[in-house]
Image (cartoon, rainbow, N blue to C red):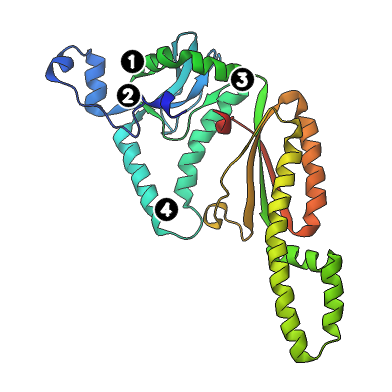
């Protein structure tokens, strides 16, 4: 998808123009360039929804369509300099904290997501990643002309489908206790340990700890793989993402699976039942399965 957006200007970066080029600009182009007003792009739709009344990421400009080649890119005007400054400040805060991400970071990301999710409720959408800035409407139209065929294929692919997510978190101590109590070999060794002298029991216990630790690591890897495969049986397409650190999840438990599923709307109930059965199966082992959606199909663009 990166190649598709080679022509997109990120975070208000504007290409330099020669004096001759500047003279040929329209008055609207000159005003936009001086004030650094660009277009924040949310995604692509086939036809713009009627009675569109959505406020953009800056909380004041309305979202509107730029139409070309039979499809539309949904945008709103934005002060690119101000937006760039906000992002720089947030990135600086993120680099300095080891705690959960700051609330203002969540707020600006949520503003983007709110627009995309509102559009998703009205029509099929190819969502753009956070921070996609177009220089002006000319740039938007050029993008639609250059990549119209690819965009139309994605719109067709996403028609009648939704993205759902599954994140799995592990309580290693609880899983460790579960393994110790339910593995026949370890259960037998625990009984043997009780019959040993204090010194021998200590050494034997250290050996068991290492053995259980290895089993926990192997079991977590195996469980994550099984959950991903079982949940994906009724999916149109699946994807495994990188697991996130506790700093970003805000949880005490370690994330062991971060996965996405593109689901046809008529099979969502089947997918839901499958996930609930997995939750019931793995909850006693100390695993928390977080099931969310529907989302715009960010992971499949």
At a point 35% along the width and 17% down the height, the residue shown is 137
In the rendered image, the residue lying farthest to the left is 19
Question: Sequence-wise, which precedes: disc 3 or disc 4?
Answer: 4
Question: Sequence-wise, which precedes: disc 4 or disc 1?
Answer: 4
At a point 33% along the width and 28% down the height, the residue shown is 9
Q: Residue 94, labelled with which disc? A: 4
**3D distance between C-alphas at marks 2 and 1:** 8 Å
Asked which quadrant contains residue 216, the reply is bottom right
**Mark 4 crowd level (few <14, some 14–19, many ≥20, 10 Å Cα):** some
On the image, the x and y values in percent for residue 12 come to 31, 32
On the image, the x and y values in percent for residue 221 come to 68, 53
Q: Quadrant of the C terminus?
A: top right
At a point 43% along the width and 29% down the height, the residue shown is 2
Q: Nearer the viewer, residue 213 or 50?
A: 213
Residue on which disc 2 sits: 135
**3D distance between C-alphas at marks 3 and 1:** 27 Å
On the image, the x and y values in percent for residue 181 come to 83, 68
User: What secondary structure is marked by label 3?
Assistant: helix
User: What secondary structure is marked by label 1?
Assistant: helix
Q: Nearer the viewer, mark 3 or mark 4?
A: 3
Question: Sequence-wise, which precedes: disc 3 or disc 1?
Answer: 1
Q: Residue 59, labelled with which disc? A: none
Residue on which disc 1 sits: 138
User: What secondary structure is marked by label 4?
Assistant: helix
In the rendered image, the residue lying farthest to the top is 70
On the image, the x and y values in percent for residue 109 come to 48, 40
Residue on which disc 3 sits: 157
Asked which quadrant contains residue 237, the reply is top right
Q: Nearer the viewer, residue 161 or 103?
A: 161
Placement of 285 over or under 209, stated as above or below: above
């Amino acid at each position: 998808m990166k190649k598709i957006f080679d022509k997109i200007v990120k975070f208000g970066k504007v290409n330099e123009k020669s004096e001759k080029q500047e003279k040929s600009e329209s008055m609207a182009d000159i005003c936009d360039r001086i004030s650094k007003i660009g277009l924040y792009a949310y995604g692509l739709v086939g036809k713009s929804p009627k009675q569109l009344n959505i406020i953009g990421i800056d909380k004041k400009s309305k979202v509107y369509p730029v139409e070309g080649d039979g499809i539309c890119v949904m945008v709103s005007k934005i002060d690119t300099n101000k937006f760039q400054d906000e992002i720089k400040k947030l990135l600086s805060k993120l680099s300095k904290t080891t705690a959960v991400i700051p609330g203002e970071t969540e707020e600006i990301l949520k503003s983007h997501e709110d627009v995309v999710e509102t559009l998703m409720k009205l029509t099929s959408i190819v969502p753009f990643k956070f921070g996609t800035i177009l220089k002006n409407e000319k740039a938007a139209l050029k993008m639609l002309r250059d990549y119209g065929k690819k965009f139309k294929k994605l719109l067709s692919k996403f028609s009648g489908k939704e993205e759902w997510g599954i994140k799995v978190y592990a309580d290693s101590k609880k899983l460790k206790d579960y393994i110790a109590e339910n593995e026949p070999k370890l259960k037998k060794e625990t009984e043997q340990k009780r019959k040993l002298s204090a010194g021998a029991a200590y050494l034997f216990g250290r050996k068991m700890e290492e053995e259980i630790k290895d089993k926990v690591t192997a079991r977590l890897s195996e469980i994550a793989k099984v959950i991903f495969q079982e949940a994906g049986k009724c999916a149109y397409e699946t994807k495994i993402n990188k697991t996130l650190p506790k700093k970003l999840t805000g949880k005490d438990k370690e994330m062991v699976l971060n996965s996405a599923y593109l689901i046809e709307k008529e099979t969502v109930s089947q997918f839901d039942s499958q996930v609930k059965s997995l939750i019931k199966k793995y909850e006693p082992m100390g695993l928390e399965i977080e099931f969310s959606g529907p989302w715009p199909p960010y992971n499949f663009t």
